[in-house]
Image (spheres, helix red, strand yellow):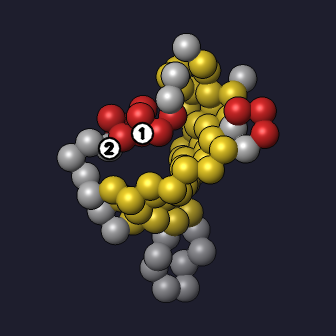
Amino acid sequence: MAEYELVHEIKNLCRNNQMRDIFFEEVECDDPEAWLRQKLRGKNLELTVETGPGGAVTIHAVVDGMIERYDFTPF
């Protein structure tokens, strides 16, 4: 099973507020997209998956109308 550092960013859509919520977590999984779908099951999801160099995965998500980004960076 692969180990990732996960950076989860929730964009703040409020006018005149540029702050974002950012969370850090260590994750063990074989498939970041499947892991995220399991974590967010029951919610209305739209996902776009990008793979980067070295096994990095970025998932852009709209979760119940909120814009979020999940960056999985392998250890």
Task: Check disc 1 and report the residue beneath it.
Answer: 36
| 1 and 2 marks in contact (CB < 8 Å) | yes
Q: Residue 21: in sight, yes or no?
A: no
Which residue is denoted by mark 2 in the rendering? 40
Count of numbered tags: 2
Q: Amino acid at mark 2?
A: Leu
* Spot occupied by residue 23 in the image (x, y as percentages of width and height): 54, 44
Numbered disc 1: secondary structure: helix
Dot 1: within a 10 Å radius of its alpha carbon, few (fewer than 14), some, or many (20 or more) residues? some
Identify the residue at image location x=32%, y=43%. Answer: 40
Q: Position of residue 74 (x, y in %)?
A: 69, 28
Mark 1–mark 2 distance (CA, rounded to whole Å)? 6 Å
Q: Residue at point 45% right, 79% down?
A: 14
For image coordinates 33% across by 35% down, the residue present is: 38
Q: Quadrant of the N terminus?
A: top right
Whether residue 29 can be seen here: yes
